[in-house]
Image (tube, helix red, strand yellow):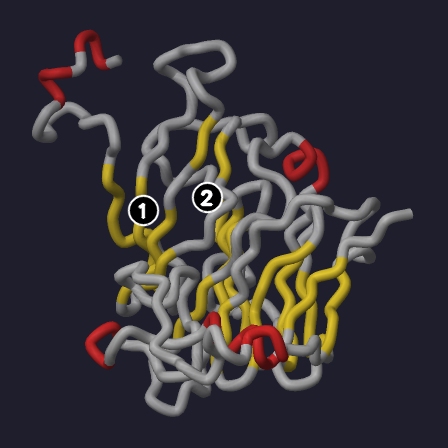
Amino acid sequence: MRFKLVALSACLLSGLVGPVDAQQGTITGEWRSYAGDLGSTKYSPLDQINRDNVQDLEIAWRWKTDNFGSRTETYSRVTPIMVNGVLYATAGRRRAAVAIDAATGETLWMYRIDEGVRGDNAPRRNSGRGIAYWSGLPDETDAQIFLITPGYHLVALDAATGRPVPNFGQDGVVDLKRGLDRPVDLIDGVIGSSSPPVVVGDVVVVGAALAEGGAPPSKENPPGHVRGYDARTGERLWIFHTIPQPGEFGHDTWEGDS
């Protein structure tokens, strides 16, 4: 059996993590957002690794994903984030959230929700692309990790323990198939997301991914609206209708409420 190995090293992380500048709100030597910062610059100014010494890099440790799920996931697009010496990532076919000691490769905690048939029917399964980090206090004692599951739930986890945040949504979970301003089948509704949310200030911004054209094509299929949620409570703060609704700018350009 071929096992997939996720090889991460301290040297590799040095080349991946870091901010563009202080205006991006990131900290040198870390990678706090999926794309490095909220501007998605994917840039690190770190210079310890260069063309002269890259050939001397050695693997410091390996972290295996073969035991996350009923079978090994063979296609991973995850970008770990790193905050205060801890890597946060997703792994496996059911998209478990994990925290890993960046220095040793030790797994600190793991969280996974069992979504049953809903997860099995999801259009965006597997490990996805990653997770998001948020803290509202200067000392970061309230730090949280946000995960979008294959079955389209938004989960808030305590960054230190991996436990669901009880005051967020319902015991740490918000059902993203609800609150779309249109009924969506909670089990078979073809909507999900493999991307992590984006946290801007105290707002968790969530997008959507749909089957191309729908199955079958219909104006009643789930909409791909964008929503913002309170990072502390899980309350929906706003929704952007990607197809304008009655009374919204541009609605008249959609014939027959298409």
Which residue appears at 69% of the width and 35% of the height? 120
- Measuring from the top left, give residue 118's x and y in whole percent: 64, 35
Q: Quadrant of the C terminus?
A: top left
Q: CA distance from mark 2 to mark 1?
A: 9 Å
**Viewer-proximal residue among 82 and 119:** 82
Left or right: where does residue 230 sit relative to residue 221?
left
Kindly identify the amino acid type of the residue bearing the numbered disc 1. Answer: Arg
The answer to whether marks 2 and 1 mark residues whose Cβ atoms lie closer than 8 Å is yes
Which mark, residue 176?
2
Kindly identify the amino acid type of the residue bearing the numbered disc 2. Answer: Leu
Find numbered disc 2 in the image and state the secondary structure of the residue it sits on: loop
Q: Is residue 187 in view?
A: yes
Which residue appears at 59% of the width and 43% of the height? 150
Which mark, residue 249?
none
In the rendered image, the vertical position of residue 29 relative to residue 248, given as above or below: below
Residue that mark 1 sits on: 227
